[in-house]
Each structure stands twice: as C-alpha cells, then as structure tokens.
Image: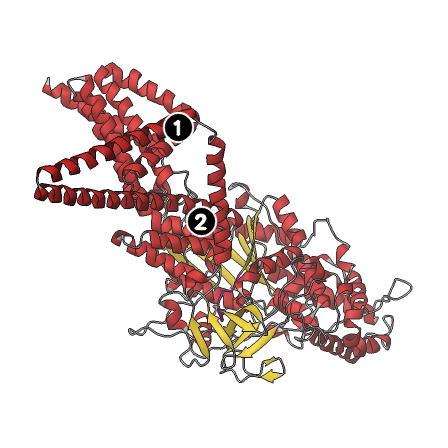
C-alpha cells in the first residue's frame, strides 16, 4: 500500500492556515463572526500555478512545434533580410548625410534636423513598442485558448480557475464585461469542476461578446451586399469588399479583447485566411448553398443582387472565421456561428431591395 | 464478504402481484390525465437512513424558492426560472413535508434535522419559460415536482417483497453468523438456539425473539459499525406500527424435516412475515416507488469508510439489493401511460463537504465502485446515469494547512457538540481545521478486507468529522442568504434540466 497522509485535526488558533480562493461577497457573509487564528486570504492567482504553467508551456511547445515544421532554410528570406539591411543602411547613410549638410549650411538648421531625428526615433520606438504589446496580447489570447481547451479536456479545476483569472484580467479594462467578470469571480470561489467552470465562463463572459461580434459580421455582410448591388463599377465594389472585410476582422478582434496593431493585424489576417482555408472543405455544403442562392434564386431577380448576396455571404464567412480565431475560448456549448445563420437575414435584405427597386421602376 | 445477495443476481425481481400492477397502472393513467394540464415529475429520493434525504429535499426546495446560486442549473443561469413555490400536495392522506421547520432547524438552530419517522410528501411547482419557441407558446410553463421523504430504514424492506420467509430466515441467520456481526448477534443467536421452530406458537416466545432480533439490528446500525443491510426496516423505525403483531416476528432456523405443523412457531412467524409484506411493504412500494420518473440515490459513503471495510461491503450489498427493486429504462410517451420507468438516475455521494475538493474525484470513484452493478443495469435498460460527489448543504470552508512539513488541503468547520476528534471532545462552538486523510486512488482497496485492518479502533486512515450546518447571516433587509451547496445545481440540471428546457 502506498503511504497515505494521516488525518489531522487542528484548532484554528494553533494552525497556520491559508484560506483558499474566497469568493467576493457571499463567502464573507457566510464566515462565522468570531474568528481567531492566523487566517489570511491568499492571493488566489498563486493557487494551482504549477498546473497552469505546465499547460501553458505545453501549448507553447505545440505552437513552436508547428512553426519549426514550417521553418527550414529559405533563400527568399535570406534575400529579403539582406535587401532590408541594405535599404536601412542606405537610409541611415542618407540621414547622416542630410544632418551633416544641414550643419554645414547653418548650425541652427543642423540642431533642428537633429531634434527632428530624435523625435522620429522616439516615435518609431513607441510604435514598435505598441506593436510588440499588441502582438503579445494576441499571443496571450492564443495561449489562453489552448489552456482552456486543455482544462476542459482534463476537467482540471485548478487549471480552469487559472484560465478564469486570466480571462478576467484580459477584460479588466472593459466596463461592458463587469457583470460577467463579477459572475466569474463568484464561480471561482465555489467548488465547481474544471470543465463546468470553462462552460460557465463561456456563458457568462463571452456570450454577450459573441452576440456583438455576430452583429458586426452581419452588419458588414449586409453592407457589402447592398454596396455590391448598387455600385456603378466593379472596381468600386472590389475595393469596398476588401475594406469591409479587413475592417470586420479588426472589429471582431477588438470585441474579443485583442488590440492588433499593424503587424498584429497581418498576423491575425494570416490566421483568418488559414482558418478559411481549413474550414473551406468543411463548409462545401455552404458553398453550394451560396451558388444556389447567389446565381439561382437572387440572380433570377437581378444579376447584381445575386453578386451582392454572394459577396455578403463571403464577408459573413470571413466574419465567422475571425470570430473563431479571435475568441479566447473554444466554442463549447454551441458550435459557434455558421453561414446558415446569416443567410436568412441577407436574402431578406435583398428581397426587400428588389421590392424597393420594383417600386422605383 | 456476504454472498447471500448474489443469489438472485441477473433475475428480474417480481415484487408486485397482479392486483398491484392493476392499481399502479390505474394510478399512472390518472397521473397521465392530470399531467396533460400541468406536467408532473415524480422525483424519487432514495437513500438509507442518515444519507441525508431530508437535508437534500430541504436544500433543493430552499434554493429553488429563494433563488439560491445554481449556476450550472440551466433554467436558473439563463434567467428563465420565474419562480418556484410549494403547492398543495396531491395526496391528502400523506403528511406534508415539514419544510419550514426543517429550514428553521438548519438555519436558526444550526442543527441537522432529526431522523425522519414517517412518510411525508411535498409538491414543488416551478414556473419557467421554455427556451424553445413551440413549448413556450404551447406549453404551460409550469412543472410540478413531487417528492416523498421517508425513513431510510424502510427502504431496506423493498427487497423482502421478492423473498419468502424461508429464504429471508436463512439469509438473516447466515449473515448474523458472519465474522462482521458475530460479536453483535450473540444474544439473539442464543435466544434463537433456545427456540424450536416446530414447537407451539407461543406469543411470549415470539415477542422475546423479535425483541432480541431488534436489539441486534440496532447494535449493527450504531455509528461504530455503520452496517447497512438490516431488514426489516420497520424494526428499526416502526412508525405507527410499534407493538403490532405484524412486527412481532423473527427469523427461525428451518426445521430439519422441511415441514412445520400448522400451529407451530414457524407457521406463526411465516404468517406474520407475509402479513408484514402485504400490509406494510407492498403499499409503501406501490404508493411511493412504483411510479417514479427520476431518481436520485444518496449514499453516505464516508460513514461506511469511517467504520471500515466490513461496513463498506455491507453498504454495497444493501444498495445492490435495494436498487434491484427499481425499474430503470427509457419509455416512449405511449407506453408511459400505463407503466412508468425511471429514465434518469443520479448517484450522489453525499456530504462531499467533509472532504477537500481535491478528494472529490476519488470519492466519486468509490461511489461508482459501490453501485457499479446498478449503473450497469440502468445503462443497459436505456436510462441515463450520472455519478456526482455532492453536498446539499455545505457546512465547511476550504483552506490549506501547513502541518508537520506537509501542505494539506483541509476543511474548516465547527464539529457537532460532543464530536470526538483526535482525543478531544468539542463543544459545538469551536471551529477547527481538519484534514480527513487521502482516499485511495484505486477504490478496490476499500473492498478488499484483507488489505486493511478490520478493527475500526486501530484504523486511522480516515476520520470524517460531523460538522454543524453553516452559519447564514442575514442581509440588512433581513433576508436569509441561500444555503451554500456543492454541485447541487449540477445534480438538479441532470434530474430536471431537460424537463425545464
């Protein structure tokens, strides 16, 4: 038989006790009035640190492994890097020459040039810093998602508690999530299994955000459909579709707490395109639906309307992918939004548009 | 290891006569008719004595009525629960469940309710809005939940319905001679040896035998032994039948010839045993257990663990026997008109608050091992089964305890007055921190009597302390906060969630 820890019973006034994860309000009310002994409320983030760190580390290695597989020696990259080096060298040389010439012409001009250069350097540095922070934030969301998936799978309540803490931290400066965060805080103090905790987090904290993200996607899809239908030239609607899709991705990311800068946005874009490529095969049925709706039904009413619906559905699909990529938890209780949910709204919209068009004629 | 209960393994018990079946079918029909107007769920709360049936029912009602925190109960968390209240119960001849007094006992006196002495009933009406469009517009948005509370001892009677006096006698005597009970059954076995089954039917002798048999059963039930398989249950909790002839019988050694004359002691006992079954057990079964929709089986595994492996084995046997009396399975709505089947069974290890939550998974494993045959049977017949470690009322808080260089997950609570822990007796006011010991990772260890010492005194692997109910403070407005619990919401979601979807 393995050695098991013996049962112990100790009076509170003799023991060194750390109270665990006390929930905010109800537990305090429940606490007996007379309490002696060295009880202190511990920092709840400390609890279960090892398990979650392990989970995070594992998620990290998974990500890295994926990247390593993609890596190899790439001549193209070498070329680009060298080229970039040359360009920055020449740029530095040009700046250096400029400053020198300014000084040669007039000392004051030189001083001004130097000052401007310093300002530019500060600006660049700040931008880089902001980009780095944004990238870190995106990575944090990715890791959070991986940790949540693992906690859900293992039904590990410590890891789940840690995930909930990180989630609350992620949204701590978002006043519209105050209610959800308060609910999560209360759940963390109770004895709830790990998987259930993640489910509760999804329900309490993320479902309002899901609704907003979905509305955004729907709005964008509608806008694209209408603009495509009424735009005078193909160039205009191509430009608009591009603009609307990029904006949608950015907005969805903002809703879920990511604040992508320029590079972060490119990274996000890559993820979304990747997701689209992966789910493209899965949603083949949806594509057929698109064909039917776009080129069959609506096209019979008007070729332009048909194109409008197809473009709108494409935007919706980009929105769905963005939601899947940006959400800090996986979809658990529902499979997440699907194109089907958007179809009704879009066709209703174009139906209304045709009626209006008929009236106008 | 008792083997007597394995005898009818795998056979379907025939517990009811055809007249019973007819009455049950008629009752079902009536239920179906009334259910057309307001759907009703009969929730069977099954558990041996001291497993916490009354506390579970009280906590369930209190949390639903007072809007307690039930985050995992979907109707609550989705905000679809409009209100819940105690309605007039359907049967006028059954006492009402004394909900208010139980709440007062728990909240104001901070004591556990006394053991239940008679059957009582309650109907909880839940008003809700369905999440689905059709059931919201077409349905009534109301669900009645009928719950019956009864002394857990009486549950032990149900297996008797499938046994003759002869079978029961030989089983009871065989059990009393086993090592676990030898020390307790001595006086009764002596009295039994002095009685002749073929002798005259002497009333005084019968009363003496019944008395010493009852004394033996009571000794077995004591906390130090915590044995469970102790039929007939009315001997321990007679209710309103105390002293009646139906309770004045005891097992006898079967006469060697196999036959006993008409006026013999054996014949008298046999007649009374049958009368007990007819007048006591069968109506109890028919009225309260034959028509259940959902069932929760409460098991106090910790008390049995406290008492040692023999108590655990005994608990397993008693549960197997009792659970064989219920009919799990999924029924269609059509067949449901005449025969009811239990389509969801929740096995709950109660008093999970006596353990730090790190130990809950192991407690669930122990329970799963205890009831594995019943779970198999229920799954095979198509019923949904879940196993959960639960505390209907959470009496403790959790803490980490640094003790002798070890970091222990401990619980804080106030032991009951007179509870002895580690050589110290507590007064019911002092709060202590307890680490109750680790449960084994492999539950088989508990069932293998050879691997652990049998004597409870020398066994210090676990010690589960009994705590007072938690102190609830009132808000400024004078409202009492809802009763804290562990996984009561999860249990409710499993038992009732789909009916409130």
State which quarter of the image contains the C terminus of chain A. top left
Decide whether residue B451 is among the magenta residues: no
Q: Majority secondary structure of the magenta segment?
A: loop
Q: Residues within 10 Å of mark 1 (few under 14, many from 20)?
A: few
**B184 left or right, relative to B81:** right
Residue at the image point whose x is 71% and y is 60% from the top: B445
Q: At which x and y percent is residue B258?
A: 88, 62
Relative to B15, residue B313 above or below: below
Residue that mark 2 sits on: B499
- Estimate the spatial distance between the alpha carbons at disc 1 and disc 2, rounded to whole Å: 61 Å
State which quarter of the image contains the N terminus of chain A. bottom right
Q: At which x and y percent is residue B209?
A: 78, 76
Q: At which x and y percent is residue B176?
A: 79, 70
Q: Which mark is residue A77?
A: 1
Say which element carries label 2: helix
Q: At which x and y percent is residue B122?
A: 47, 63
Region rendered in magenta: B390-398
Q: How is the image coloured?
A: secondary structure
């Amino acid at each position: 038989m393995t050695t098991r820890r013996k049962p112990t019973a100790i009076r509170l006034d003799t023991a060194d006790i750390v109270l665990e994860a006390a929930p905010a309000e109800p537990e305090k009310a429940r606490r007996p009035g007379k309490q002696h002994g060295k009880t202190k409320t511990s920092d709840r983030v400390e609890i279960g640190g090892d398990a979650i760190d392990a989970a995070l580390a594992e998620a990290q290695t998974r990500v890295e492994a994926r990247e390593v597989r993609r890596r190899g020696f790439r001549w193209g990259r070498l070329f680009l890097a060298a080229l970039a080096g040359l360009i920055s060298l020449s740029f530095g040389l040009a700046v250096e020459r400029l400053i020198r010439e300014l000084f040669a012409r007039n000392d004051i001009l030189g001083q001004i040039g130097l000052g401007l250069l310093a300002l530019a350097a500060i600006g660049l540095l700040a931008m880089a810093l902001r980009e780095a922070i944004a990238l870190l934030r995106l990575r944090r969301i990715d890791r959070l998602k991986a940790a949540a998936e693992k906690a859900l799978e293992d039904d590990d309540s410590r890891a789940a508690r840690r995930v909930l803490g990180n989630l609350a931290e992620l949204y701590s400066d978002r006043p519209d999530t105050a209610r959800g965060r308060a609910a999560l805080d209360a759940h963390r103090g109770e004895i709830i299994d790990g998987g259930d905790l993640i489910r509760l987090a999804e329900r309490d904290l993320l479902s309002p955000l899901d609704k907003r993200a979905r509305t955004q996607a729907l709005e964008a899809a509608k806008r694209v459909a209408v603009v495509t239908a009424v735009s005078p030239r193909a160039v205009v609607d191509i430009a608009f579709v591009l603009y609307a899709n990029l904006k949608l991705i950015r907005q969805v990311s903002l809703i879920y707490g990511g604040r992508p800068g320029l590079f972060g946005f490119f990274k996000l874009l890559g993820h979304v395109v990747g997701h689209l490529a992966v789910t493209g095969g899965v949603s083949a049925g949806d594509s057929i639906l698109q064909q039917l709706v776009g080129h069959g039904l609506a096209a019979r009413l008007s070729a332009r309307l048909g194109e409008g619906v197809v473009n709108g559905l494409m935007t919706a699909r980009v929105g769905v992918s963005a939601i899947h990529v940006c959400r800090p938890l996986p979809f658990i209780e529902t499979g997440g939004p699907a194109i089907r949910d958007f179809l009704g709204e879009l066709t209703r919209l174009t139906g209304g548009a045709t009626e209006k068009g008929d009236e106008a004629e | 290891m008792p083997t007597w209960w394995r005898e009818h393994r795998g056979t379907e018990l025939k517990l009811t006569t055809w007249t019973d079946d007819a009455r049950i079918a008629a009752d079902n029909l009536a239920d179906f008719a009334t259910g057309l107007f307001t759907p009703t769920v009969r929730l069977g709360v099954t558990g041996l004595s001291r497993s916490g049936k009354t506390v579970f029912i009280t906590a369930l009602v209190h949390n639903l009525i007072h809007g307690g925190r039930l985050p995992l109960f979907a109707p609550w968390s989705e905000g679809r629960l409009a209100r819940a209240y105690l309605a007039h119960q359907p049967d006028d001849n059954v006492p009402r469940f004394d909900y208010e007094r139980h709440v007062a006992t728990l909240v104001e006196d901070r004591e556990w309710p006394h053991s239940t002495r008679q059957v009582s009933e309650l109907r909880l009406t839940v008003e809700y809005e369905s999440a689905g469009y059709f059931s919201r517009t077409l349905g009534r948005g109301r669900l009645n939940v009928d719950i019956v509370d009864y002394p857990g001892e009486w549950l032990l009677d149900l297996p008797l319905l499938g046994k003759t006096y002869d079978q029961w006698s030989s089983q009871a005597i065989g059990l009393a001679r086993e090592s676990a009970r030898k020390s307790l059954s001595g006086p009764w076995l002596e009295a039994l040896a002095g009685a002749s089954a073929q002798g005259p039917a002497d009333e005084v002798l019968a009363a003496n035998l019944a008395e010493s048999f009852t004394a033996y059963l009571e000794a077995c039930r004591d906390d130090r032994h915590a044995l469970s398989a102790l039929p007939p249950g009315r001997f321990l909790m007679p209710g309103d039948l105390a002293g009646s002839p139906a309770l004045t019988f005891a097992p006898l050694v079967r006469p060697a010839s196999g036959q006993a004359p008409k006026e013999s002691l054996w014949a008298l006992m046999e007649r009374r045993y049958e009368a007990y079954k007819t007048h006591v057990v069968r109506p109890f079964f028919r009225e309260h257990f034959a028509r259940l929709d959902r069932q929760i089986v409460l098991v106090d595994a910790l008390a049995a663990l406290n008492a040692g492996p023999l108590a655990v084995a005994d608990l397993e046997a008693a549960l197997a026997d009792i659970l064989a009396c219920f009919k799990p399975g999924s029924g269609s709505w059509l067949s449901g008109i005449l025969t009811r089947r239990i389509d969801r069974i929740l096995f709950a290890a109660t008093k999970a608050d006596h353990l730090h939550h790190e130990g809950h998974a192991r407690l669930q494993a122990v329970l799963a091992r205890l009831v594995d045959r019943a779970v198999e049977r229920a799954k095979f017949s198509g019923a949904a089964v879940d196993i959960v470690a639960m505390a209907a009322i959470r009496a403790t808080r959790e803490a980490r305890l640094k003790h002798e260089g070890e970091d222990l997950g401990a619980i804080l609570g106030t032991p009951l007055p007179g509870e002895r822990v580690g050589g110290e007796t507590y007064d019911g006011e002092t709060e202590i921190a307890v680490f109750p010991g680790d449960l084994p990772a492999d539950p088989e260890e508990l069932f293998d009597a050879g691997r652990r010492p049998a004597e409870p005194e020398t066994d210090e692997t676990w010690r589960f302390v009994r705590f007072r109910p938690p102190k609830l403070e009132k808000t400024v407005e004078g409202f009492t906060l809802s009763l804290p619990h562990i996984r009561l919401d999860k249990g409710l979601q499993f038992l009732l969630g789909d009916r409130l979807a």
